[in-house]
Image (cartoon, helix red, strand yellow):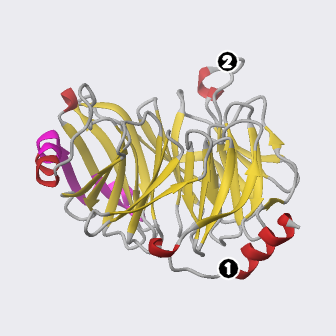
Amino acid sequence: HQSKHVTATLQTRYNCMRMDFANGPRIAAVIPHQKPATGLCYHNDGVHLFASCEDDSRLYMINAQTGKCDSPAIRCERDGIRLVSSTHHDQCVLLAGKGSTDLPISQRHSLNYMSVYDNKVLRKFRGHSDLVTKISLSPADDTFLTSSKDRTVRLWNVQQAGCLGKMDLPKQTEGTPCSVFDSTGLVFAIMAGMAGGEGYHLHLYDARNYSGGAFSELKVTKADIEKAMATQRVSIPSGSSIMNWRTMQFNASGSRILVESDPGIAIVLDGYESTVQRIFHTPKPTQQSSTVFTPDDKSVIMGADDGKLYCWDVENGALLKTLEGHRGPIGALACNPKYAQIASSCSDTCLWLW
């Protein structure tokens, strides 16, 4: 009876798009996993949700309307699964694994274009020589970007195996790059650390003419961050660094960029000038976090290792709500692109509805 009630709740309340944190959300469905989920990605139709578990290399296909798995989990034991990205086909995904030591280094960190319908690898993308840390699919076509610890960014097309373009980070930069498309697919950004930990370069490219170089070269310095922290009265634990940026994303309008940093810090930048607009952080230090914009651009949500979801207003910086329900650290978080639904994962994946 409880299962029938949950399914009915999902179906009747699924089409509401407004994310009003004054009146919700609540957990409407729980999908159990054998190991903690480390990746979540919705298909653009808002119906298909993919959850990846790195520890046991399983991929779960969740129906976001019913709150159930449409089919048994897929095992990818040889390559493993670290990252999952949906594609424009609702039954195909891009997977980045942990790397097989049995293969030559040039093939060790390949990506798989997989059909989840018949559990078949349709195409492999080889070229990276170290772990792939980010996959970003263009909303406009079948191209996608990958960022890697080998300090390169590559551009691909799911319809062909060869790399379309490659950028090596200059020697005067540090760390692992991060690349991401905006919501139109017409612009992509590449982020790279400055030497000595003094800040980050943020270059914007025209996706149709990327070979011409960046049309905008922005930077965010350590001094910019420290000034914003003082203005907004943000403090972090002693010994922590706010300059360890891990990933980024554009909001739906492209006017803002959300940067996820350690330890449990989210930085909102102006999407055109890279000025620091907001800095969000959890009340207690967290070693693991996942952060997203809501599709309406009004809020930022962060899942932390205390099992809670923190929801902030982007404009005024107010903490709107703290959502509780997970039994362990939240390793993945995603917002439904079509409907008022949030997915968050620890050892289970929870679907939150208004």
Q: Amino acid at mark 2?
A: Thr
- Residue at left offset 69%, top offset 30%: 55
Report the residue marked by disc 2: 101
Q: Label 2: how many residues lie within 10 Å, few (<14), some (14-19) or many (20+)? A: few
| Residue 219 in sight | yes
Report the residue marked by disc 1: 13
Residue 325 magenta: no
Label 2 sits on a secondary structure element that is loop
- Residue at left offset 73%, top offset 73%: 10
Numbered range of the magenta stretch: 203-226
Total marks in image: 2
Image quarter hosting the N terminus: bottom right
- Residue at left offset 81%, top offset 71%: 5
Q: Amino acid at mark 1?
A: Arg
Above or below, 94 against 16 in this view is: above
| Residue 213 in sight | no
Left or right of 38 in this view: 225: left
Quadrant in the picture for residue 351: bottom right
